[in-house]
Amino acid sequence: MSSPLFDPIIFLERKFGLQFKRVSSDEFSSSCPWCGGEDRFRVWTTGNYWCRPGPGHCGRKGWVDKLDGTAKLTKDALLELRLQQLERAQKETERRISALERMAHCQDHRIYHAALNDEAREWWYAEGINDDSIERYQLGYCPRCPTDKSGRSSYTIPIINDGQLLNIRHRLKTNGGDKYRPHMAGLGTQLFNADFLHGAKDTIIVEGSKKSIVLDQQGLGSVAIMGKRAFKKEWLAWFGNLTTIYVILDPDAKESALRLASIFDGKGKVVNLPVKPDDFFTLYGGTVDEFADFLKLAKPVRC
């Protein structure tokens, strides 16, 4: 198994010139560096890889950190692989631009906000979110979620940056897995509450938009990623003028928190909070002063 700070995805990208796309929270896919099979080469954040067997596919598997002695592809083969990746990337970019344009004209989040009834508001209250936040973030309710074939209801969180709607997150009314769905698939992940970073001196990064909203109610400025490995490199520029970035992921994601904090050139600090940051206030009755004590104990993480 890989060490906590070893990133198998970055290692393979640099070693073989691959370009990965996310399949799930901990799984990525790309062309196989050995047989060239498209989208059958899978790598997990735990460090293991597998080229899924099939016609023209090698079926090779193992651990990424055992590949130091593996020969690279030939120059011609690597060039052909990169050309294919560029073509796919161009098509994906064109598709995403078209989808984003459609999303920018979408007004569904306003419809969902207007659909809030007393019962739906009570659900938001139970999550620790008050009326002021419901209005500020345009939180809503969808009686029949368009992302769910069974027609369950959902609670909605718009992702808005610089006044533009980027997507809407649907939180299905269920206690099982797969709770969150995007209103429009294929747009990638977004940084929630990114507008807070304009003029901020420091910030907190949490995992999940509801956590960011609860912290905001306590006067604690934060942004949220939608998964412990969902931070995009292109967002780094937004954090350039900040002096401190506190990373508070869920208690079971300490390795991911260390990895994330390490990319901020010494400005990133991991906060070892024993519970989820929203639960700290809503379930355990913590105070802002007590929360600040945990921030003071955080140490910088360097590459």
Image: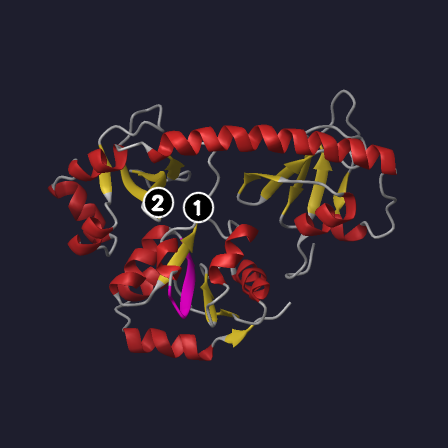
Sequence-first tag of 2 and 1: 2
Q: Along the horizontal axis of the image, is 82 left or right of 223?
A: right
> Which disc, if any, is residue 190?
1
Residue sitting at 46 percent across and 60 percent down?
249
* Above-or-below relation of 280 to 63: below
State the image coordinates of residue 276 (x, y, percent, origin top left).
38, 61
The percent position of residue 65, horizontal first and vertical second, equals 76, 53
Residue 265 appears in which quarter of the rendering? bottom right
User: Element at badge 1?
Assistant: loop
Q: Is residue 290 magenta?
A: no
Where 141 sits versus 238, above or below?
A: above
Q: Are marks 2 and 1 in contact (CB under 8 Å)?
A: yes
**How far apart are the two marked residues, 2 and 1, measured between alpha carbons?**
7 Å
Q: Name the residue nearer the viewer: 60 or 224.
A: 224
Please state which amino acid type lies under the numbered disc 1.
Answer: Gln
Residue 183 showing in the rendered view: no
**Mark 1 crowd level (few <14, some 14–19, many ≥20, 10 Å Cα):** some
| In the rendered image, the vertical position of residue 257 relative to residue 182, given as above or below | below
Give the residues drawn in magenta, as a range: 199-207
Q: Name the disc covering residue 33, or none.
A: none
* Residue ID at (57%, 61%): 255
Amino acid type of the residue that numbered disc 2 sits on in the rendered structure: Ile
Which residue, as the protein is rendered here, is positioned at the far top?
A: 55
Q: Position of residue 216 (x, y in %)?
A: 29, 62
Which residue lies under the disc numbered 2?
A: 159
Front residue of this view, candidates 156 and 66 = 156
Give the residue at x 88% y 44%.
71
Q: Quadrant of the C terminus?
A: bottom right
